[in-house]
Amino acid sequence: PPLRVIVTALVAAFVSGAVYVIDPPSVTVGVADRLTVVTSMSSGTVVVAAVGNRGPAARPLYPAAYERVIAVTAVNGSRRVYRLANRGAHVDFAAPGVKVLHADRESGYRSSSGTSLAAPFVTAVIATSCADVRPIDACLQALQRTAEDIGEAGFDPVFGHGLIVPLRSSAPP
């Protein structure tokens, strides 16, 4: 996507209260990290996190495994799950995260894969779709209902509610 679209989405994420949790996901989490996540959520911030890339049989990673954190997995252009993505009942949404072109300080641009590349897509969708909606839970429930079901019928541990789709009433500037 053009840089203007990316910057606009990140600004919208900041303004709306959505936040992308910095990687790396971890099996264990410190008290300070948990306190930061809990404090953010209690102040109305939506916390979005990558589920991790340790494989389908790996234990859930934090902060994605915390209750009420929006846990994101990655899919490729054919809507197949990223082969190294963690799985589990905590997965909420899927988003593009395989062979994503991004800036690289050494070569200008490069392509990478992983759930960490999918989480910003979900953050941007939440920021643009939910910016003016309160309570935020109503918007998140609408996003769950409108997600494209790309796995087993209904909610599943691979894709969660499915491929996240922006709500029609919102459009990026």
Image (tube, rainbow, N blue to C red):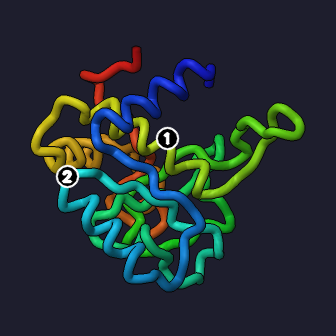
Which secondary structure, mark 2? loop
Q: Position of residue 133 (x, y in %)?
A: 15, 34
Q: Is residue 61 visible?
A: yes
Circle 2 crowding by C-alpha within 10 Å: few under 14, some 14–19, many from 20: some
State left or right for residue 101 relative to residue 147. right
Label 2: which residue? 44
Q: Which residue is at 44% across, 46% downward?
A: 163
Outermost residue toward the top in this view: 173
Answer yes or no: do the residues labelled 1 and 2 have beta carbons within 8 Å?
no
Q: Is residue 89 visible?
A: no
- Residue farthest to the left, as pictured: 135
Helix, strand or loop at disc 1? helix
- Residue in view at x 53 percent, y 22 percent: 5
**Of the residues tagged 1 and 2, which is closer to the observer?**
2
Looking at the picture, does residue 140 appear above or below residue 33? above
Displayed quadrant of residue 111: top right
As drawn, the label of residue 151 is: none
Looking at the rendered image, the quarter that the N terminus falls into is top right
Dot 1 amino acid type: Phe
> Going from the N terminus, do you reach mark 1 or mark 2 first?
2
Q: What is the residue that sits farthest to the right in this orientation? A: 107
Residue 13 image position (x, y, % from top left): 38, 37
Which three-letter amino acid code belongs to the residue tagged 2?
A: Gly
Residue at 29%, 32% (x, y): give it. Answer: 129
Tell me which residue sits at (42%, 30%) in the image: 11
What residue is shown with label 1?
A: 121
Q: CA distance from mark 1 to mark 2?
A: 20 Å
Say left or right for 81 vs 127: right
Where residue 169 sits, quadrant-wise, is top left
Q: Is residue 5 left or right of residue 111?
A: left
Q: Nearer the viewer, residue 74 or 68?
A: 68
Q: Residues within 10 Å of mark 1 (few under 14, many from 20)?
A: many
